[in-house]
Image (tube, grey):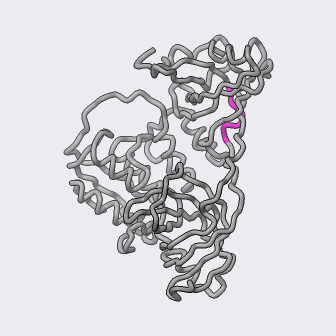
Amino acid sequence: MLGGRVRIADHIGWDRSFPVKYLLVQEDEDGAERLWGRCAGVEGLFVDPVPPAREVLTLRGCSPDGPLRDVLADPGASLRGLGDVCVEARDGEQPLQWWTLVDAVVVAHRPHPADPARYDVVLGAGVRNEEGFLELPPVPHFELFAGTTACAASAGRCAAVDGLFEPRAEPAPLPLELIGCEPAEPLLAALRRPRRRERGWGRLLVLDRHGAVMASRTVGLAVTGARPSVLGGTLVDVTLADGGDDRPTPASRPVWEEWHRGAPTEPNRWAPYDSQGRAEWLDLTTRAWRVPVPRPDRSGREHRLDGRFVTDVPGLHCAIAEALLGPGRYFGREWNAFKDCLGGGFGVVPPFTLTWHDSEVARRALADVVEDPEGRLSYFEEIVQLLERCGVTVVLR
């Protein structure tokens, strides 16, 4: 053990014609990791999330904003899609609880009986609860946001949401198959007691071709089946009942394959991907499992940002992280996380100079991406303003 963690180098080599690509580990009560097994492959790592069941909800006393206001202004608003909508319950200015209305569609709308300037809006959507339930205040109010987690725009506010506070069954877990697995003692013990369901959780460490950990995913350790491996020898194929709910989608495969070749060493390797691929790239910079090396933050230098490919929010954060720290590094993936990184502890801290080449690319591409509650600043302008407020000299070229 080293610092309570499994020593990766001790487990990546074995006498077979194919490499170890995954390690299954679990942290015990003392905080030390134990190896459960190592394997050559995994089936079911890339899955599309199971969509929540469709429901009908009503936003009561709604003051629409942004995309919702635009939809309601259209005489043919019925059955118009809004994409994902976040509903945030608040007590004054304090956010308490939030839900995602997945693929929300406007079914109908009409003036609110007590205030004709407001609306009752009927939506069809899947409902996903993002946090455990908290007790709401006697008179909460609800803020609405449309868009992705990385960049959401205000969609207004409402006094109540009929149908939101209903019990919902959890979706059935999706299994995960470990292919060509060499079990260590904890997994052997589970296999010897096939009727006993382990209720703990472990981590599946995903290795690149050099044996370095490129990602980590939480998986359930309940074993529902085992058989001689299709790869032969003494290996087994093991089925885990729950492969976890943070698995990448099949569309993410090209990005993962890129990282599997090794941590990026060249700039702009993220640039050919679309927004979803770039977001997955950021996810790998965030979640890659590594032991941090303590070192002081650097400051006072000039950093050059290549802005030629900054055409969306994920691309902006890929480019900034690359400019400050180098390829494949993490320095926030949205405004709040980026602000936290500027506070120190991530390798670079103000004051420093950021020379942003081809800045007009981002200015134009993000002109209509607005998170500012008052709608005055684009996302590009907000990032520049944040940098300057934190003590960064920004030179736009």
Quadrant location of the C terminus?
bottom left
Q: Residue at x 48, y 59 (%)?
A: 136
Left or right of 1? Residue 45 is right
Q: Residue at x 60, y 63 (%)?
A: 164
| Towards the viewer: 326 or 202 | 202
- Res. 295 in view: yes
Question: In the figure, 180 relative to 136: above or below?
Answer: above
Left or right of 363? Residue 186 is right
Q: Residue at x 24, y 39 (%)?
A: 298
Q: Residue at x 35, y 74 (%)?
A: 376
Left or right of 376? Residue 286 is right
Q: Position of residue 315 (x, y in %)?
A: 46, 54
Quadrant location of the N terminus?
top left
Q: Position of residue 37 (x, y in %)?
A: 63, 19
Can you tell which quarter of the image residue 15 is in? top right
| Towards the viewer: 264 or 65 | 65
| Towards the viewer: 67 or 109 | 109
Q: Residue 373 in magenta?
A: no
Q: Residue furthest front?
A: 138
Can you tell which quarter of the image residue 128 is in? bottom right
Q: Which residues are magenta?
A: 41-46
